[in-house]
């Protein structure tokens, strides 16, 4: 397929995507929009987790810690000034008298998460494999403990509520699109190739001149940046942030989404995040009907274990979607049907 | 209370907490040394054991029957866990099994919430009629004494088991080189199942002691102890059993004296300090206190 044709298709797909958002924003019910928003947030989370865990091969369990940081930054920034003075007594004066909009909150949430990832990454990324996994899990617990105890800024276990509902599909859709594009660009860039090389063979990659610690840090920080943004979108969608929201369940959920989609495949992450969001909502409806809660957790964990045993590469393995592939598949199916 | 008495009291407290950590860590280290698997669900065996004990006790059985049966149930649960969740994954990457064990945690904890409800339940089974007594104005709670004596006995027996019995020697061989010991005819599955069984019995016992200390149980009780046991294992040098014991006691003392020394406003942060400690030990001395040789870099 000719390159200009490919970019035409890509632009058309993006156009369709925004048309869909436009339609949902105009005609969708509150519930539809909420599910679509959540879907976009999960796509951001899964794709950025895939950058650090799948493509780069860092075994991080602490990703949701960055989401927590992003969500709290957004909460502190966007909370109405009156409530801030009442609840968050530890804030400096200039901060407690302003109320920021979504864009500055998003950017700051991403930047702060990235800064923390940079500092934590310098230390933790020297570890590998299971040790990195448990150290990052330690980071997640540390973030939660701080969120629970820093009463004057995070309001402790009660959480910060009454956040303005700034998030809409335009924001989440655009953020998801940017995340996907940036991660795909990184994968195809020399940096991305270095990441794959380091993942496959650390020493061999270093011996051809790749700075492995630096490339690991890069993947970790970029991933944390987008995760932080997802956190800010979440905060202003749900309206409440509390320490318990960003913990083990969400960590496992995005790991499931990533593994089932295929570690290393952005396409797989998008498909699987979207699919699991819908599944999660269906199950929630079912749970409400029979008034037994927690089935979705058990089912998801079981599905994850089955996938990891019988199809460890997930849906996509590490392949990516491309128009050429689609064309070939279409031609193949045409040839088969009479 | 005099400072000496206070110190002694905290000392016993630390010894007892460290004993529990040591019990949990041994199970974690046994399985890790053989399979390179970090079993996060190990903590949920504590939960399963405690709930089983409470259920059997509530059904009217005498305390010692409930305790024996509950600990045995926890051991069997460990065997089932190995068979269902980890054996199909034998030979896959470390990360795969680690993520699986994470899924097992969510599965078991939510299963427990579904079965027993999310609420905390009182756990009064080791509630002796006079829970504390005093020597030279030092208040000593009986559960601490029981914990320490029980753990020390078990540690001694474990050491003998690993040094002297055929199974213990087989375990050490498999931990040293899995393929080679398979080649010389050691039944891998038997060794692995025994490691899981012993580790799970210890977890069940640790669950009992932990719950009796706290006086309550809840479905998510196992997670923080197991992550802390990992910290203890790292302190001691991962996979080494004596190291696991030392690591458990070091962690117990560090935690208790941290609580005693921290100003009240910072009490809530103590878990955060424990994990900061973990990260620093991993960086400065990744082989742990007892680990002699540095972790080899596999090429």
Image (cartoon, coloured by chain):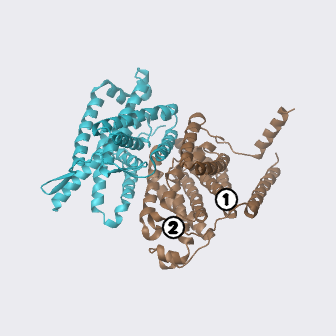
Chain colours: A brown, B cyan
**Between B136 and A195, which is closer to the camera in this rendering?**
B136
Percent from the top left, x then y, of residue A168? 67, 64
Q: In the structure shown, which secondary structural element does the residue marked by tag 2 occupy? A: loop
Which residue is disc 1 drawn over? A31
Residue A157 badge = none
User: Would residue A292 be visible to someone looking at this image?
Assistant: yes
Instruction: Please report, as a chain letter, where disc 2 is located.
Output: A
Within the image, what quadrant is residue A335 found in? Answer: top right
| Left or right: where B270 falls relative to A271 | left
Rendered residue at 49%/51% (across/down): A248
Q: In the structure shown, which secondary structural element does the residue marked by tag 1 occupy? A: helix
Which residue is disc 2 drawn over? A160
Camera-side mark, 1 or 2? 1
**Between A73 and A28, which is closer to the camera in this rendering?**
A28
Report the residue that reaches farthest toward the right.
A338
Percent from the top left, x then y, of residue A212? 53, 49
Rendered residue at 34%/35% (across/down): B69
Examine the rendered structure and indicate whether residue B253 appears above or below residue A232: above
Mark with earlier residue (1, 2): 1
Labels 1 and 2 in the same subunit: yes
Instruction: Please report, as a chain letter, where disc 1 is located.
Output: A
Examine the rendered structure and indicate whether residue B38 appears above or below residue B251: above
Rendered residue at 60%/44% (across/down): A263
Percent from the top left, x then y, of residue B249? 28, 47
Within the image, what quadrant is residue A227 found in? Answer: bottom right
Q: Neighbour class for label 1 at 10 Å: few (<14), some, many (≥20)?
A: few
Quadrant placement of the C terminus of chain A: top right
Q: Gap between marks 1 and 2, in whole Å?
A: 23 Å
Examine the rendered structure and indicate whether residue B154 appears above or below residue A250: above
| Left or right: where B245 falls relative to A259 | left
């Amino acid at each position: 397929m000719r390159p200009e044709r490919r970019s035409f298709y890509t632009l058309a797909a993006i156009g369709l995507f925004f048309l869909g958002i436009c339609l949902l924003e105009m005609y969708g019910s509150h519930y539809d929009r909420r599910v679509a928003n959540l879907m976009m947030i999960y796509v951001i989370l899964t794709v950025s987790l895939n950058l650090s865990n799948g493509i780069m091969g860092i075994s991080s369990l602490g990703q949701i810690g960055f989401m927590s940081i992003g969500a709290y930054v957004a909460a502190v920034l966007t909370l109405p000034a009156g409530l801030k003075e009442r609840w968050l007594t530890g804030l400096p004066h200039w901060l407690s008298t302003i109320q920021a909009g979504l864009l500055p909150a998003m950017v700051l949430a991403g930047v702060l998460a990235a800064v923390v990832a940079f500092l934590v990454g310098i230390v933790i990324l020297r570890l590998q494999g299971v040790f990195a996994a448990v150290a990052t899990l330690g980071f997640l617990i540390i973030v939660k403990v701080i969120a629970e105890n820093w009463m004057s800024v995070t309001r402790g276990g009660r959480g910060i509520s009454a956040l303005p509902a700034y998030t809409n599909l335009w924001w989440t859709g655009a953020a998801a699109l940017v995340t996907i594009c940036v991660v795909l660009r990184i994968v195809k860039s020399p940096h991305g190739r270095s990441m794959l090389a380091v993942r496959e063979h650390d020493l061999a990659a270093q011996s051809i001149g790749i700075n492995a610690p630096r490339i690991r840090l890069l993947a970790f920080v970029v991933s944390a940046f987008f995760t932080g943004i997802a956190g800010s979108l979440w905060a202003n969608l749900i309206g409440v942030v509390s320490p318990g929201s960003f913990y083990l369940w969400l960590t496992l959920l995005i790991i499931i989404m990533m593994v089932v989609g295929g570690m290393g495949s952005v396409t797989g992450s998008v498909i699987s995040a979207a699919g699991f969001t819908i599944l999660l909502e269906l199950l929630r409806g079912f749970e409400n009907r029979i008034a037994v809660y927690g089935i979705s957790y058990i089912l998801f964990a079981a599905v994850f274990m089955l996938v990891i045993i019988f199809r460890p590469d997930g849906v996509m393995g590490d392949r990516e979607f491309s128009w050429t592939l689609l064309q070939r598949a279409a031609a193949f199916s045409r040839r088969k049907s009479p | 209370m005099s400072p000496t008495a206070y110190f002694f009291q905290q000392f016993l407290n630390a010894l007892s907490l460290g004993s529990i950590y040591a019990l949990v860590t041994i199970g974690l280290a046994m399985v890790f040394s053989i399979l390179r698997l970090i079993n996060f669900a190990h903590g949920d065996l504590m939960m399963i054991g405690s709930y089983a004990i409470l259920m059997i006790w509530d059904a009217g059985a005498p305390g010692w029957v409930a305790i024996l049966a509950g600990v045995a149930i926890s051991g069997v649960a460990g065997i089932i866990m190995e068979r269902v969740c980890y054996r199909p994954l034998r030979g896959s990457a470390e990360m795969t099994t680690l993520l699986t064990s994470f899924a097992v945690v969510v599965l078991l904890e939510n299963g427990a919430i579904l079965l027993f409800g999310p609420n905390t339940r009182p756990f009064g089974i080791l509630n002796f009629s006079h829970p504390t007594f005093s020597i030279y104005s030092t208040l000593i709670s009986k559960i601490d004494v029981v914990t320490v004596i029980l753990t020390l006995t078990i540690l001694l027996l474990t050491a003998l088991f690993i040094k002297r019995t055929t199974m213990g020697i087989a375990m050490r061989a498999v931990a040293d080189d899995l393929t080679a010991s398979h080649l010389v005819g050691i039944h891998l599955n038997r060794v692995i199942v025994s490691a899981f069984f012993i580790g799970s019995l210890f977890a069940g016992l640790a669950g009992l002691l932990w719950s009796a200390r706290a006086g309550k149980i809840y479905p998510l009780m196992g997670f923080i102890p197991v992550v802390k046991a990992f910290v203890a294992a790292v302190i001691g040098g991962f996979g080494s059993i004596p190291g696991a014991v030392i690591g458990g006691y070091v962690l117990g003392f560090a935690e208790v004296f941290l609580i005693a020394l921290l100003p009240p406003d910072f009490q809530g942060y103590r878990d955060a300090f424990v994990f900061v400690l973990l990260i620093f030990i991993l960086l400065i001395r990744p082989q742990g206190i007892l680990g002699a040789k540095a972790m080899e870099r596999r090429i």
